[in-house]
Image (spheres, rainbow, N blue to C red):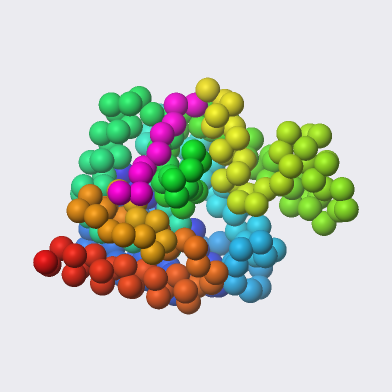
Amino acid sequence: MKLYYIWSTGIEALHHLFQANHKDQYAFDIIDDKIVQLEGESVYKSDVWHNAVLKKTIRDYNVLKKHPNETMVFSDPDICIYDAPKLKAYLENRMAEENLEFLAMQESYYDAHNGGFLCVKSTKNTRWLYKKSIEVLSYFIRVRSKFLFKPMLWFKYGIWDLPYLDQTIMNKYLKEGGINYAYIPGSIGCWADGLLTEDTLFHHAVCTTNQDEKLILLKKKQKEFNNFNNC
């Protein structure tokens, strides 16, 4: 199973840690794409962040178009997979048994997905989802500096704001587009500084504000996981 992620010079340390953490696993064929980025770190709500999310969504859409009917993973680089073979089997089993097109890490305990770890089958529905997300996100980036950008966005797409960009868009259209989707629970994908369980297969360093905080949290949870499994 192919696993894709993007990175830039602004988060190069996360890229190196991701590569180091997963160099000895063979369950996923990891494909990284370095993007040309605006100057500065990709922190939440910055111009760099908006630009990076749009480029990631375009890259993912192009991958889906290139590999129809295939299933693949789209990951952020602030993810650490603890047991790659078990995670691959978990994803394959759920996608097959539930006939899913879109399986995503759950956004904490809400009825919403988190865009940091997605297992997507390239179907007509999912390609439409990504194409629609690019359309809405591109429009938002163009108009967000205007005084009435929220009413403009609402009038055109029925969305008032995009606090989480592609994630907000997809959460709307997943529910409206007839796509068969489901969530990966927090017991499988550890959220932020949450508790690890015997079922935990990966961790996502969310609820952090910059690269340094993500690195610290990733290393902390890796140490906790090692201690947990050596008990």
Q: Is residue 214 left or right of residue 45?
A: left
Furthest residue toward right: 147
Region rendered in magenta: 179-187
Q: Vertical placement of 33 versus 230: above or below?
A: above
Residue at 57 percent of width and 25 percent of height = 177
Q: What is the quadrant of residue 14 in the picture?
A: bottom left
- Classify residue 5 as left or right of residue 82: right
- Residue depicted at x 48% and y 43%: 110
The answer to if 183 sits in the magenta stretch is yes
Q: Quadrant of residue 79?
A: bottom left
Which quadrant of the rendered structure holds the C terminus? Answer: bottom left
In this picture, is 188 found above or below 42? above
Residue in view at x 62 percent, y 40 percent: 169
Q: Can residue 39 be seen by looking at this rendering?
A: yes
Would residue 145 be found to the left or right of residue 29 on screen?
Answer: right
Residue at point 66% right, 68% down? 38
In depth, the one of 58 and 225 nearer the eye is 225
Q: Is residue 128 magenta?
A: no
Quarter of the rendering occupied by the N terminus: top left
Residue 33 in sight: no
Measured along the vertical axis of the image, is residue 40 above or below residue 52? Answer: below
Q: Position of residue 12 (x, y in %)?
A: 48, 72
Residue 33 place in picture, x, y as percent: 48, 58
